[in-house]
Amino acid sequence: MFKGLANIASLVKQAQQMGSKLQGVNEELKAQRASGSAGGGLVEVEVNGLGEVLRVRIDPKLVEQQDREMIEDLIPAATNQAIAKSRQLHADAVKSMTSGMDIPGLGEALEGLQPGAGDMK
């Protein structure tokens, strides 16, 4: 019985450590950058490690052509590419943060953070 209580206390301590580490990881992710492009670089999107869009660049030639449909197609493609890279940054940061922690089910939960995991096609 006391062994079970010790395990619970250990889990609570690890959860508290993770909470404080998570704040630091979020700050690091906010400073990291990932980018995606589409149309051979005609559209580029930059996001931070949290997946927040920071910048969108559209080649002036594309704007001059007034090809609204192409722009509308390229922006989501570039954004999705950048966000996928951002998710990988996030997954790597969480794995690094939790390395050495013995929390049941943690490995499976971290696999769900990988880009494409659980995405509906």
Image (cartoon, helix red, strand yellow):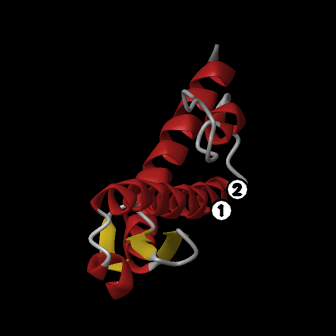
For label 2, the crowd category at 10 Å Cα-Cα, with few meaning under 14, some 14 to 19 and many 20 or more, is few
The kind of residue tagged 1 is Ser
At a point 64% along the width and 46% down the height, the residue shown is 114
Q: Position of residue 12 (x, y in %)?
A: 48, 38
Task: Give the label on residue 99, or none.
Answer: 2
Task: Locate residue 89 relative to residue 56 in the image: left or right.
Answer: right
Q: How far is disc 1 from disc 2 in space, using C-alphas?
A: 5 Å
Q: Residues within 10 Å of mark 1 (few under 14, many from 20)?
A: few
- Can you say which quadrant of the picture contains the N terminus? top right
Label placed on residue 54: none
Does residue 56 appear in the picture of this structure? no
| Callout 2 secondary element | loop
Left or right, residue 57 beside residue 84: left
Callout 2 amino acid: Ser
Total of numbered circles in the picture? 2
Q: Residue at x 40, y 80 (%)?
A: 31
In the rendering, at what x and y percent does residue 97 appear?
A: 59, 60
Q: Nearer the viewer, residue 97 or 92?
A: 92
Query: Which quarter of the rendering shows the C terminus?
Result: top right
CB contact under 8 Å: marks 1 and 2: yes
Q: Position of residue 100 (x, y in %)?
A: 73, 54
The residue closer to the viewer here, 16 or 112, is: 112
Q: Residue at x 32, y 86 (%)?
A: 60
Seen in the picture, residue 79 relative to 5 is either above or below; the reply is below
Q: Which residue is mark 1?
A: 96
